[in-house]
Amino acid sequence: MAVNVVSSIPYRHQPDFRAYVAFRGTLFSATFLGSFLMYGICHWLWRKQISMPRVALVCVAASYPMGVPVAAVSFWSEIHLGGTMQPFSWGKVFAAAPGASFILIAWSALYFGIKHYFALEQKSRQLVASEMLATEAQSLAREMQLRALRYQLQPHFLFNTLNAISTLILDEQPRVAMEMITHLANLLRSTLDSPDRDYVSLADEIAVTEEYLAIEEVRFGSRLKVRLELDRDAMETQVPRLLLQPLVENAIRHGIAKRAKGGNIVLRAIARDSLLSVQIVNELPDITDSSPSNGSKAWGGLGLANVRKRMEQAFGSDGTLNTRKTPDGFFEATLSFPLAVPTNGDATMLRE
């Protein structure tokens, strides 16, 4: 609320300045109060150990009814405290309600992300304190670290997607927002199924990545072009869950999004000599000084660090993540690790 108010100070001489401050200030204040009620719902769901798909459904269903009174109070404040002459309209209230509901949904996602993180931390401490055999203890600790990294990634991606949906609603693009919500629901369904599975086949991982790309294609339209070059024999290889999504997200966020005309992303998977190589290639931004140098930590931040840790935990020194800027103006992120399933043949599957 403070950031919104302060950022609007340059426009304080505009005739609708008071109305804007009154509306936004009341919206954030009322949503903050509504978060206490949402906390009660989330706390009850957590104590009952409800499955995550049902948790998501309940939180989404509860957020909109709570968003309606928040929007109503905000419009009342705009009229009576902001001095606007517009009449009160329930149509505007229902149109503005999703904005408040998305804030509550994001708050719920943060709540369960923190809960899962601390639950996994507690389990990790219990494992360290136990008197298991050394080999079994190391194996279980590695599994918990992998799972903790995966749960760290899921709220991060979810917040970004919800922010994009909220932006579409504020830009009055409800059809595009609904299309993105549909893709998000499919993605959440695939990632929340069997939450204890830390490894999936490359085919399943590619399918989840395609759902994420479908969300981004809604945002970017014709500016984003995706090409998949997949070795058919590598599709049953077991890989850490949600391994590719952060790399694709980095390619879009730091590459395609910063190009005026958009660009291309190529996802390759090649099986050779008992090793699987997965490569994500994207065009660099138009501004050359924002292009990453080889191994730059700034290019990708949390996403690349997360993937490197997961590769180390899953494969040790046999798993690597290398990044580089190519001479022809592309950025490459290459994963390499042992095949879990024998391969035969050179059949390659191309999709665009």
Image (cartoon, grey):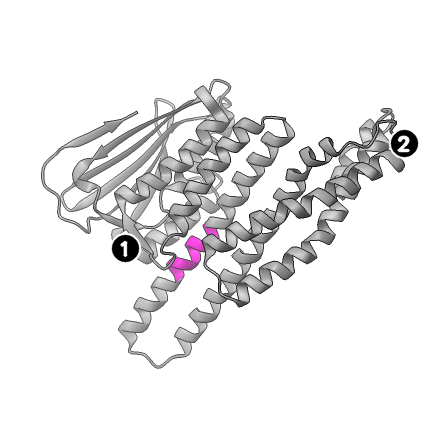
Q: Which residue is drawn at 61% across and 59% down?
A: 41
Q: Report the residue marked by disc 2.
A: 83
Q: What element carries label 1?
A: helix
Name the spot of residue 216 as percent of width and height, x first: 46, 31
**Crowd band around label 2 with a 10 angstrom C-alpha radius: few (<14), some (14–19), many (20+):** some
Q: Quadrant of residue 234?
A: top left
Give the dominant element type of the magenta stretch: helix, strand or loop: helix
What's the amino acid at mark 1?
Phe
Q: What element carries label 2?
A: loop
Q: Which span is picked out in magenta?
A: 145-153
Q: Residue at x 32, y 39 (%)?
A: 207
Q: In the drawing, what numbered circle is on residue 315?
A: 1
Name the spot of residue 111 as percent of width and height, x first: 58, 57
Depicted 145 relative to depicted 258: above or below: below
Front of the two marks 1 and 2: 2
Towards the viewer: 302 or 76: 76
